[in-house]
Amino acid sequence: MNITVLIVAVTAITSFLAFSNHKFFDELIFWPYRIWRNSEWYRLVSCGFIHADISHLLFNMIALYSFGMNVEAYFTQIFQGKGLTLFVVMYFVAIAGADVYNLFTRKDDYGYRSLGASGGVSAVVFASILLDPFSKIYIMFIPIGIPAFAFGGIYLLYCAYMAKRGGDNIGHMAHFTGSIFGFIFPIIFAPELLPRFIHMLSTGR
């Protein structure tokens, strides 16, 4: 079984269990107040296995499956025996890292909680953009594919704007942070990927 499929399956099962079990849900959610007072650091990762509702779960898991299968294959090709390990590390570190800002700024806010795999999913999407910048990304209700590199730029601007505006109860900063991390992470282990990406953009292929 592919690692991507396994993550999707475990996340879906855990999310469905949490939908009907409030205690289980509360034990997994990202909750800075509890993390600092009870040393529940596992919440930085466990929050990525639960979602607010079915639509939230479906959106994240469809995106993870769509991009993750290709990124997993690329990682196996580029990093060989370390590829799958690096893929898993990237995904879960992105989930944890996406919440670091709120971990510190909301540590005394009892009511603040967040959940979802968006940080990790964003990392996978942007790793895909790095590796294949001219692949097509299709957005609901738009009949033509957008080149991945163009989508990436627009998405980052959108996340930055919405994070600054706020008020919609969506973790735009987590999306932004996860995206940047996913682009940089493969370059740390294979620096040649950055000039490759630039060359592909400059030549159009």
Image: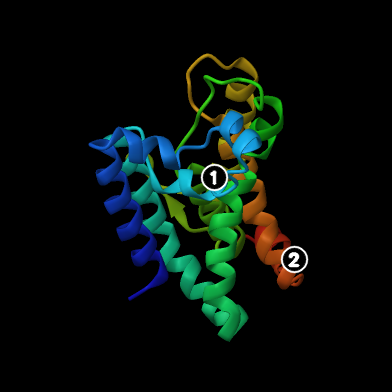
| Crowd rating for badge 1 (residues with CA inside 10 Å; few <14, some 14–19, many 20+) | many
Q: Is 169 displayed left or right of 201 in the figure?
A: left
Image quarter where the N terminus lies is bottom left
Q: Relative to 120, is 86 above or below? A: below
Residue at the image position 62 percent from the left and 59 percent from the top? 130
Q: Is 80 displayed left or right of 63 in the figure?
A: right
Residue at the image position 53 percent from the left and 59 percent from the top? 128
Q: Quadrant of residue 174?
A: top right
**Residue 67, numbered label:** none
| In front: label 2 or label 1 | 1
Q: Quadrant of residue 55?
A: top left
Which residue extends farthest bottom?
81
Q: Relative to 157, is 130 above or below? A: below
Q: Can residue 128 be seen?
A: yes
Amino acid on which disc 1 is placed: Gly
Which residue extends farthest front?
38
| Crowd rating for badge 2 (residues with CA inside 10 Å; few <14, some 14–19, many 20+) | few
Give residue 138's position: percent from left, percent from top.
38, 46
Give residue 135's position: percent from left, percent from top.
48, 58
**Residue 119, numbered label:** 1
Marks 2/1: CA distance?
Answer: 19 Å
Which residue extends farthest left?
20
Residue at the image position 70 percent from the left and 26 percent from the top? 105
Give residue 148's position: percent from left, percent from top.
52, 51
The total number of labels drawn is 2
Residue pointed to by mark 2: 188
Q: Look at the numbered disc 2 and give the secondary structure of its residue.
A: helix
Do the residues bearing badges 2 and 1 touch, measured as CB atoms within 8 Å? no
Sooner in the amino-acid sequence: mark 2 or mark 1: 1
